[in-house]
Amino acid sequence: MISDSMREAIDCYQNGNYRASSIMIRKSVELLCKDKNVPGVNLFDRIESLKKIITLPEVLLNELKNLRILSNDAANVNAEVYDNITAEETVVGIEFTKKIIEAVYQFDDLLLKLNKLKEQDP
């Protein structure tokens, strides 16, 4: 569940486990893509597919790729920044991901409400 992954990301961040938090941020994005049934062989492809089915500014969706890179570095022992994931990077990643998730689901909810109103209108 997306909210569980985000809570874990926040818990990890609050305990100073920035790599673990970054990985949970990525998992949250992965779960968002899964929930929206977007195709793709990897997260990069799924983010590209996500652009086609949700309405958000493209610049925000493009920045999801940067979160993907941060979490790749957090998980990859061969990455140069493996041990250098900072609190600032992590907290920005959490806030950004929360806003994307909120926007996606609030927009969906608003569209549902508007469609119900249209159905009631004679």
Image (cartoon, rainbow, N blue to C red):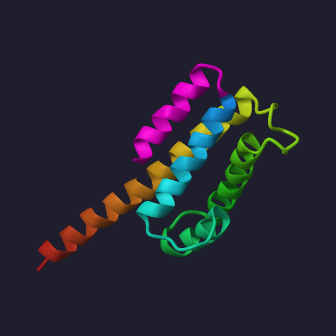
> At 71% from the left edge and 27% from the top edge, which residue is drawn?
87
Whether 14 is among the magenta residues is yes
Determine the residue located farthest toward the right in the rendered image. Answer: 80
Asked if residue 93 is positioned above or below residue 42 in the image, the reply reads above
Determine the residue located farthest toward the top in the rendered image. Answer: 15
Quarter of the picture holding the C terminus:
bottom left
Closer to us: 108 or 30 = 30
Whether 50 is among the magenta residues is no
x, y percentage for residue 103?
47, 53
Residue 41, quarter of picture: bottom right
Determine the residue located farthest toward the bottom in the rendered image. Answer: 122
> At 57% from the left edge and 27% from the top edge, which residue is drawn?
12
x, y percentage for residue 118?
21, 74
Residue 109, quarter of picture: bottom left
Asked if residue 101 is positioned above or below residue 77 in the image, the reply reads below
Q: Is residue 84 left or right of residue 42?
A: right
x, y percentage for residue 57?
60, 63
Q: Is residue 11 left or right of residue 41?
A: left
Asked if residue 26 is positioned above or below residue 65 in the image, the reply reads above
> At 84% from the left edge and 45% from the top edge, which residue is drawn?
79
Residue 58, quarter of picture: bottom right
Closer to us: 5 or 116 = 5
Asked if residue 70 is positioned above or below residue 41 in the image, the reply reads above
Q: Is residue 72 left or right of residue 30?
A: right
Q: Which range of residues does the magenta coloring cover?
A: 1-17
All told, the count of numbered labels is 0
Q: Main secondary structure of the magenta part?
A: helix
x, y percentage for residue 95?
58, 38
